Amino acid sequence: MFDRVRKSWAGFREALRSERDSGGDKRTHNLFEAAAAYVSACAEDDQERIDEAAGWVSPEALSFGVNELACRAVIALARERDESPRTVARALLGLPVS
C-alpha cells in the first residue's frame, strides 16, 4: 500500500519537474484539468478534444491525473453503492466478482 503511494508521489514529482524544465512553454491547464478533459473526451469519443487535452501536460502527468481520476471515481461509486472499491472496479470492467 505505502509502496504504491510512494511510487505515485515519485511519478507526480517527476511530472511536475518535467513540466517546469520544458523551457518557456507556459501551460494554462494543470494535470487534473487535462485528465478530466481527456477522460471526458474519451468517453464521448471526441478525438479532437482528446488530442487537445493530451497536449496540455506531459504524458507522465496526464497518466498520473487519469489514474487519480479513476481512483476517485471508483471510491465515489463504491460509497454511493455501499460496495467495496474492488467490487465496483471489477463491475465497471465487466469482470466477474471474485
Image (tube, rainbow, N blue to C red):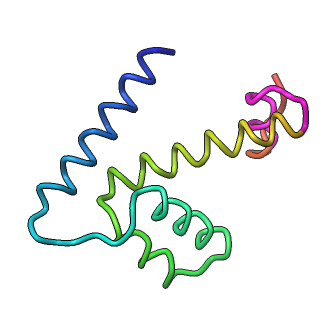
Q: Residue at x 90, y 37 (%)?
A: 81
Q: Quadrant of residue 71?
A: top right
Of residue 6 and residue 43, the one placed in the foreground of this image is 6
Residue furthest bottom as drawn:
48
Q: Is residue 60 magenta?
A: no
Predominant secondary structure, magenta span: helix
Q: Residue at x 80, y 36 (%)?
A: 88
Residue 17 vs 21, above or below: the answer is: above
Residue 4 spot, x, y in % from top left: 45, 23
Q: Is residue 85 magenta?
A: yes
Of residue 62 and residue 27, the one placed in the foreground of this image is 27
Left or right position of 42 against 75? left
Q: Quadrant of residue 37?
A: bottom right
Tell me the quadrant of the picture where the C terminus can be found. Answer: top right
Residue 70 spot, x, y in % from top left: 61, 46
Q: Which residues are magenta?
A: 81-91
Residue 39 spot, x, y in % from top left: 58, 63
Q: Quadrant of residue 41?
A: bottom right
